[in-house]
Image (tube, rainbow, N blue to C red):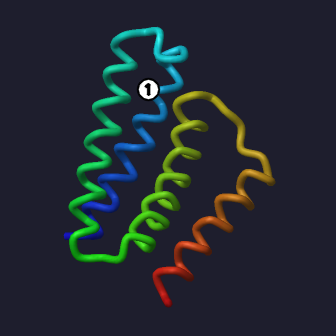
Amino acid sequence: MQLALLSLAALCFAAGGVFMKSSAGASRPLPTIAFLLLFIAGAIAQARAMRGLDMGAVYVAVLGLEAVLAMGFSILLLGERLSLFRLVAVILIVAGVALLRRF
């Protein structure tokens, strides 16, 4: 259950980032409302996941998965390009999350 909540939190935060980008600095009402609601939903999912897990591990796991999802969304939905540097950075983040979960 915690893994599903962690995944949901990361998905909400990453999707919220897409709407944040389209909100033009929170000047467009509908994307602004969408990103705020998604961030609130992500925070609730993350808080529920924290009930049974360590806070540090949950935060890093959500941030790692969110980084991967945000990178994918930025490429697929926003037309941003994937550079070697960005790819290596995301791989390092995922490796760090994997190490943290292991120890």
Image quarter of residue 38: top left
Q: Position of residue 88 (x, y in %)?
A: 74, 61
Instruction: Judge from the rendering whether residue 99 lies leftward or rightward of residue 82; answer left or right.
Output: left
Asked if 68 appears above or below 61 in the picture, the reply is: above
Instruction: Judge from the rendering whether residue 31 lies leftward or rightward of residue 72; answer left or right.
Output: left
Which residue ends up furthest to the bottom in the rendered image? 103
Reading the image, the residue beneath label 1 is: 19
Q: Position of residue 28 (x, y in %)?
A: 43, 9
Q: Residue at x 60, y 74 (%)?
A: 96
Type of amino acid under label 1: Phe
Which residue ends up furthest to the top in the rendered image? 28
User: SS class of the residue under badge 1?
Assistant: helix
Q: From the viewer's side, name the closer residue of 42 and 78.
A: 42
Q: Residue at x 53, y 78 (%)?
A: 98
Asked if 62 appears above or below 99 in the picture, the reply is: above
Instruction: Judge from the rendering whether residue 4 lies leftward or rightward of residue 31; answer left or right.
Output: left
Instruction: Judge from the rendering whether residue 49 lies leftward or rightward of residue 25; answer left or right.
Output: left
Asked if 89 appears above or below 18 in the picture, the reply is: below
User: How many labels sit on residues?
Assistant: 1
Q: Residue at x 30, y 76 (%)?
A: 53
> Which quarter of the rendered picture does the N terminus lie within?
bottom left
Q: Position of residue 79 (x, y in %)?
A: 63, 29
Few, some or many C-alpha atoms within 10 Å of disc 1 (few <14, some 14-19, many ≥20)? many
Q: Position of residue 10 (x, y in %)?
A: 39, 52
Q: Residue at x 73, y 51 (%)?
A: 86
Asked if 40 appears above or below 101 in the picture, the reply is: above
